[in-house]
Amino acid sequence: MKVCLISPPTVTEFNERAVAEFEAARLIFEHAPMGILSLAAVLEQEGIESEILDLNRLFFTYIAGDLRNQGVDFSSYAIGELSGIRADVFGFSTICSSYPLTLRLARGVREVHPEAAILLGGPQASVVDVATLETFSFVDLIVRGEAEETLPRVLDGLSDRQPDFTNLAGVTYRRGQTVLRNPNAPVIEDLDRLPLPAFHLYSHTNNCSFIPIEAGRGCPFACNFCSTNDFFRRRFRLKSADVLVEQMKTIKRIYDIASFDLIHDMFTVDRKKVVGFCEAIEESGEDLYWGCSARTDCIDDELIDLMAANGCTGIFFGIDSGSDRMQTLMQKRLNLAEAALRIKRANRREIKHTVSLITGFPEETKEDLRSSIRFIGESLRHQNAQIQLHLLAPLAETPITTQYENELVFDDIFSDISFHGWEQDPEERAMIMKHPKLFPNFYAVPTRWLERQYLRQVREFILHGIAKARWMMVLLHRESGDLLSVFDEWVAWSARERELDGVVDTSRRYYSGDRFPRDLTLFVESTYLESAKHPHVMQTVVDLENALYDFDGKTAASRARRISLEDLDSKPVIADDARFLMVSADYTRLMRSLKRRERFDSIPIEQVPLGLIREQAEIKVLQLTQTSYELMKLCDGSRTIKQIADEFPAAKKLGVSPLKASVYGLASLARQGLINIAPSNN
């Protein structure tokens, strides 16, 4: 028997060829499909051949080939790929956001491989199992919950002439026209006995920048909007430190990859085990780097320090709401003041950390939303914080969805919690609208106090404002104390400015496009600059953001060759990937004040030169001395080093010879990538 295991697509929102080239998109595409690779490893132990199809990777190929603009839809493209795979069983892993697409692909497989069995598994199929089999006849069986022990037994049953799953726990199947749902299978208590996922079956493993590795399963908490706790039966389990570290070492040895994403929603719940894991890494003597997820009430400063000292480079913090009232209503119950301290500590230890919030809860008021946006504003000053703001998705069979299942609204404003796309295929939309109980996450719970369109635009403004002009948003938070009020003023300003057009563009394409950052700086200048407590500080930030926007260099700056006193006929010139501007305040002190929430009173009005240099995908801002700036202005490509020395007015103030001062200064500018040295013609 041969089995084809298909991962669920999670990146189909990236539907432009250019977008597929972005680093963030590439990181997601390069995330090895750990779930199906874990199953493949189990099947391999049982002597069952399996083939892996990663739909994320396939989607990347589809977009990079510009097939969408050639009129080819991804479903047809993927079915074409599946038609060439010879297997007895096709097993689809499922998640909520791409469930309509998965079902279309399953139907396509039935058409091209009519004799093959079609199985579904994973979080979404597990909770809508009966409705799925009752609605879609091309699905034969659903494996619910953890599949490593159940799937081999299903395959054994399928090998019989008359399969009988009567006594097999954890499956939902069809007998004739009747759908039968067997009791749940027990969870796998000892995760250590599961084999290392079959990364050798994934042809792109060597190209991954990091590897996902399962650290454990289960969440003991009961947030009313979350499906994770039910899928794993609320049974919290961690792999032992020895096994986990040994698996990381094995992957590093085989694939030369030392960075890992530890998959577990609640990695730090058992503090003792996390300490043991950190000690095991230290004892291994290996350089291993890893990220994890943690509740802020299940981690402390001492543990953060220990984790950072032993390779932790990233933490996902699910805050979900900045409102104490909403924390109680959603049954999350975080202490937000303590959460802010954990974020601060992670930032201090140079750990990249995600601060994730959700809006769109049915009981949420504007004041609750304001509290969440204020929490974002405070977190934003930590330079290692990455902010997420999601619209609530009513996930199937969660308490909040069950409570409002007869009030769900289909309004085309999809949640982004699991990467919903900008647009849905017409066939998928029809499927979603016809079967709301199968696809509730594409709907919305009623929000009595907040309009969904308003929430969507708040999200776009906040997230794209951060992406385009982070420190301006930090300053606006400082000046106003309330980015939600800034947003309301932005909406009013936009309406006035666009009055002649008759249209105010609130689409995601506008906010993600080139016009929004220009409009944002115009808005700040016209609305806040005149009344700002420290206008020179705000003007500096505005000027810098405009300069960064105008800086359109596309490659890393080339470095100068070594400068020698013997090469005085060389001609220094400003590097192609360097820009310069003069601002009204000390940039270094300003940034320190923003990050530390210090007062701006001690920052005087003064002319300060800045240099911008592109380093790979980032733009580095350098504060220059007046002497460096004067020297740099002479680097126009027409003057030799000797001529620059003759004209360098600041050399006399330095108390050294003009030539020595010029060569030293030029060498420093070249090392920073701000100038290049054109060789002499001799």
Image: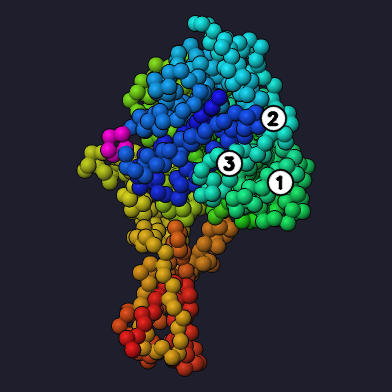
Q: Disc 1 marks which amino acid?
A: Glu
Confirm or deny contact between disc 2 and disc 3 (CB under 8 A).
no
Left or right of residue 305, residue 520 in this image: left
Q: Which element type, helix, strand or loop, lies under badge 2? A: loop
Q: Which element type, helix, strand or loop, lies under badge 1? A: helix
Q: Which residue is mark 1?
A: 246
Foreground mark, 3 or 1, reads 3
Q: Which residue is mark 3?
A: 199
Left or right of residue 49, residue 667 in this image: left
The first of marks 1 and 2 along the sequence is 2
Residue drawn at the location 50% of the way across and 19% of the way down? 117
- Callout 3 crowding tier (Cα within 10 Å): few <14, some 14–19, many ≥20: many
The answer to whether residue 230 is seen in the rendering is no
The first of marks 3 and 1 along the sequence is 3
The CA distance from mark 3 to mark 1 is 15 Å
The CA distance from mark 2 to mark 3 is 30 Å
Q: Which element type, helix, strand or loop, lies under badge 3? A: helix
- Callout 2 crowding tier (Cα within 10 Å): few <14, some 14–19, many ≥20: some
Confirm or deny contact between disc 3 and disc 1 (CB under 8 A).
no
Q: Which residue is mark 2?
A: 220
652 or 34, nearer to the observer: 34
The first of marks 2 and 3 along the sequence is 3
Q: Disc 3 marks which amino acid?
A: Phe
Image coords of residue 369 (percent x, y): 50, 36
Q: Disc 2 marks which amino acid?
A: Pro
Q: Which residues are magenta?
A: 68-72
